[in-house]
Every structure is written in C-alpha cells, then in structure tokens.
Amino acid sequence: MLEGKSKLRESLGEIARKAGFSALGVTRADAAPKTAERLRQWLASGAHGDMIWMEETERRRASPVGLWPEVRSVISLGMSYAPGTDPFALADRPDRGRISVYAQGADYHDVVKKALKQVARWLAEEAGAGVKVFVDTAPVMEKPLAEAAGLGWQGKHTNLVSRTDGSWLFLGAIYTTLELDPDAPHAMRCGSCSACIAACPTDAFPAPFQLDARRCISYLTIEHKGPIPEEFREAMGNRIYGCDDCLAVCPWNRFADAARANRAFLPRAELAAPRLADLLALDDAAFRKVFAGSPIKRIGRGRMVRNAAIAAGNSGLPELAPMLERLKQDEDEVVAEAACWALARLNAG
C-alpha cells in the first residue's frame, strides 16, 4: 500500500509538471487551524475594505471542510510567473502606465484552472477520488494552505514566498476525498528582513504579516470602485493596475528563474508599457478589445481610465491635459472627478 501511495505521488508530481506547475505539496484538510481566527480578526478590523464577498463567504473560506465537508486532503500547486525584466523598469517613465507583472500576459484564472482540471481529472481516473479545483475566485485560503503543504511561507508582505520561485507564484488547489500523506509545512524564512514593508508606497502594512487592503495600491486600482482617496494618489505614481513593489524587493527573488515561468504569462506588447495617452482615450469597445484575455478586463473601462487619469496627474506632462479636459465631461462620475483632480495637479505644476 505504501508503495502504491509513493507511486501515485510520484506520478502526480509528473502530471503537474507537464501541466505547467512548478511546485506541488499536499496537506490535510484541517492543517491550518489558525486560519479561521486570523480571518475573523482581519475582517472585524475592516481591513478588507470593499471586498464584502470575503465577509459573506467567511465560514466557507475559513476551512476547506466548510466549503466541502468530504475533503480529506488538499493538493496545493504553484505556477511561476517570474518576470524576465525589472518590475521597476517603468518607474521613471511618466508617459507610461505600470501594470503588475501578473497581469501583463494571459488571464491566470483561465490558465491555472485549465491546468488544475487536467491534474484533477488524472487523479480522479487513476485513484477513483472525488476532486474539486479552485483558483483565486473561490472562497479558499490558498496561501495558508500552500504554507501548510510546504510550498513556501507567508512573508511579511502576507504573500507566499518560495525558496525556488520567490514571490512570483500563482496558487491553485485541488480538494480531494483521498487520504494522501501530507508534506511538512514550510518554516518562515524572512528572518530580520523587512524590505517589503519598507518598500510599500502607501504604508499598507501596519505590522509584519498584516495588510490593510484599504491602503494597498493593488486594492485601490483593482477592487475599489469609487474615487481613490486623495491621500494615496501621489504615491500611486504611474501604477495603473496593481503594484509589485513589496514582491519585487524580496531577496528570495534572486532564486526565481524566469525560464521556469509558464509561457502563457509572457507580457503582451500592448500591456508591458502602455502609453497613458492611449489609455485615456479608451471607450468601452476599445477597452474590451485591448484587454481581451487579460485579468484586467474585469475592472471595466471606468476604473482603468480613472487610474490612468491619476497617473496623468502625477506625470507632469502638459501634453496630457487636453485628454483630461475631455474626460472632465465623462459620463462616469468617478472618471470625471479623477480627470478634474489630475488637470488641477498638472496646472499647479
């Protein structure tokens, strides 16, 4: 029986590698018991901001069993998206918008879920097991589960850090009714380093291992629907979708090899260094065309143009003023407000 389990695990790893995953680990469904209380405290503090769905799914999110009572083991998988270029390369290009590394290629939801289904289908056929696959949008705490499965540890920036892939891993999970031998959880290896906390432009980490999403540029540019609070606008710089700063400065990234990254996440030319002028001119149809197949498409034209307007206000480029002038009359009130702020900032400069 032990030989059979060993062979199954070896084959599982090979199937996962062929599907495009660079990391795999197994944990018991009850292996992260502190997750529920930490989640409860975080939600009670209001640090999740507008992400009301996290409150609504708290019970199911707190434990794998809460989502699927029959689950016995969780297979945690990681897919590398390690960049081949410097994530800070556009920091001094005010005419360009900075898009988070993870969103410059294909939509990871589609890529990772397809690969998860491939692995899960094999497992169901090979072992006769019940399986369910999850990536990001489901009420699953992927990071604590990945830590429990030995893929890495949750760093002081609250994201998973891997000794082989740094901070550049997409996570997915396969819940199964199989009783699989678990891997050892990964030890925390941040040591005294606090580079990620120091790098945050908006001081979104009130303490190590704690994130206040309401101050996070990724949250503000992606999840937040209304006007971005003025106290954060200058710090946004030219970031128009997400922020990589806390990830990019992690010393463990020196072990991350871009050759291990799934090629689906190679940056598309139009997303690697988009011109703010082009983004400010987007209408709904153009937005859908440019961002088809990208995770960016879900925020819609309004939030993208809002973000681009703030970046324009920070740019110091007077040639963007005519576009902002037109956007002052935009039918989206949030866009119009951002354009007014940006134009006033440019004129004041």
Image: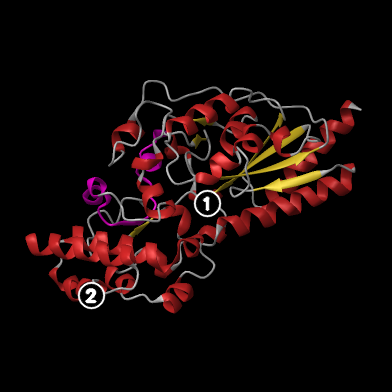
* Residue identifier under label 1: 259
In the depicted structure, whether residue 199 falls above or below residue 186: below
Q: Is residue 329 left or right of residue 125?
A: left
Magenta-drawn stretch contains 277 = no
- Residue at image position (54%, 51%) is 261
- Residue at image position (46%, 33%) is 158
Q: From the top left corner, tell me how far across and down residue 21 is, in percent.
A: 64, 47
Q: From the top left corner, tell me how far across and down residue 147 is, in percent.
A: 59, 30
Residue 349 visible in the shown view: no
Outermost residue toward the left?
A: 348
Which contiguous range is marked in magenta?
Answer: 230-251
Decide which of 98, 4 is in the foreground and name it.
Answer: 98
The numbered disc on residue 323 is 2
In the depicted structure, whether residue 103 falls above or below residue 252: below
> Marks 1/2: CA distance?
40 Å
Q: Quadrant of the N terminus?
A: top right
Q: Secondary structure at mark 1?
A: helix
- Number of marks in the image? 2
Q: Secondary structure at mark 2?
A: helix
Amino acid, disc 2: Met
Amino acid, disc 1: Ala
Label 1 neighbour load within 10 Å: few <14, some 14-19, many 20+ = few
Magenta-drawn stretch contains 240 = yes
Decide which of 158, 167 is in the foreground and name it.
Answer: 158
Residue 64 location, quadrant: top right
